[in-house]
Amino acid sequence: MVNTMNDLQQLEELDKKHFLHPTSPIKQQQESGPSFIFKEGRGIFLEDYKGNVVIDGMSSLWNVNIGHGREELAEVAAEQMKKLAFSSCFATYSNEPAIRLAAKLAQLAPGDLTTTFFTSGGSEANDTAYKLARHYWILKGEPEKKKIISRTKSYHGVSMGATSATGLKPFRDFSSSIAPDFLHVDHFNTDALREKILIEGPETIAAFIAEPVQGAGGVHIAPDHYFKEIRDICDFYNILFITDEVITGFGRTGEWFGMNHYGVTPDMMCFAKGVTSGYAQLGGVMLSEKLHRDFSNFSSGTLLHGYTYSGHPMACAVALKNIEIIERENLVHQAKEAGEWLRKGMKWIQSERKIVGNVRSLGLMGAVEIKNAGEANSKGANPKSPLIVNEAAKRGLICRSVVFDHQDTLVFAPPLTIQKEEIEKMIAILNDAIKSIEERS
Ligand code: PMP
């Protein structure tokens, strides 16, 4: 229990000594301890042990789509745990929540994506998709089709395959011996993709993977025609098209899935995050009917790929309830509407603040660029967005800065439940935070 300042200091010391944090500046943590130790969440708000209440402007990691503190999900998890906390899905064993969730996902997903392989998160989903794509071509008698093409500024996770596919170079440079047969092309440039396919030879390419909206890379939104062209290129060269909907799935962009904006169905679709709104760890890959049929027709052995927690009953029960809430509260539509308020707010900031450049958004994924980022970075100047993130946090808003690839950008992804007044509050805090840095420069 944390009752006194002394208890809290002890907790901070334990954090420094024993907790190696994911994607965190280790020196800063060792010097200053954890920046927040959260205690509770309610709606769009998080509260820490010091009594700070902040707007979770990132839905934590783009995932808490239905907001914090939903007791219904706690109840369904407890019920399922009491009945059947876990059982295997290997060797054709099954469980009811996993079956019902797979069937529900088939109803919701674009086109003929009808069959799901479950994982515990997004990285595992992406690695699964690469392995299934390569296995598919082995089954079809074309084992040389094994290269995976992805894009610059993409983020696909941190397992070895997902790291190798990730276009943001610092993630690949973090460790050595990145996996072979992963190639990258300029994002949004279909000619670059064609050229790469021709240079490498289509007979060597298994799949192309893309996020419908690039999230961690800085909220980059493809032009309208882009994904139709990608689909055509993949069909023409007999390459599987995989979408990474780990962020964009389950209402984030104002549609159930990002690809709904583009009217394109991939051969495989990876999902995670919003499927449970973070209330349990779950991800997966959906396969088109054709792909699934081909797997069934050509495979005679065992599908030698499976995680212990593939089809975890409690996680699947939580996902079903989470989806029920999204439907019941009409949150996909709500995200579209709230997205318009966010867009208006960002435009207003753009008109008010002279250091703000381009702003862009789709549904509840938004980005505000700070001007002259490339120039500043190349002169060795420090980007401003990390300072703005600190100022915003002090004022009660969590958002994120993206400085990869000479960018200097602030990004947002609040829960889909966010109300108009709450967006206005978010925008006001952001404007103040930017202003405070503008005045210093
Ligand atoms: N793909 C995308 C588009 C993501 O944004 C993320 C996580 N931010 C991942 C994959 C990896 O998911 P996870 O962290 O659950 O492994």
Image (tube, rainbow, N blue to C red):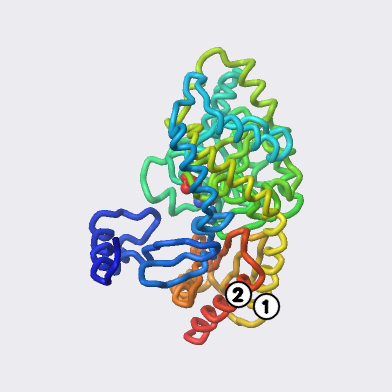
Q: 103 or 183, which lies in front?
A: 103
Q: In this view, does 303 lie to the left or right of 173?
A: right
Give the numbered dot on residue 348: 1
Q: Is residue 437 left or right of residue 110?
A: left
Q: How far apart are marks 2 and 1 (CA)?
A: 9 Å
Q: 254 or 123, which lies in front?
A: 254
Q: Which residue: 23% across, 70% down? A: 6
Of mark 2 and mark 1, the one earlier in the sequence is: 1
- Amino acid type, label 1: Trp
Q: Which of the 4 quarters of the picture holds residue 427?
A: bottom right
Q: Position of residue 308 (x, y in %)?
A: 42, 30
Q: 402 or 119, which lies in front?
A: 119
Question: How many numbered discs?
Answer: 2
Q: Report if the CB atoms under discs 2 and 1 are less than 8 Å apart.
A: yes
Q: Which residue: 68% across, 64% down? A: 338
- Amino acid type, label 2: Ile
Q: Name the residue under label 2.
A: 427
Q: Position of residue 128 (x, y in %)?
A: 51, 33
Does residue 167 appear in the picture of this structure? no
Q: Which residue: 23% across, 64% down? A: 10
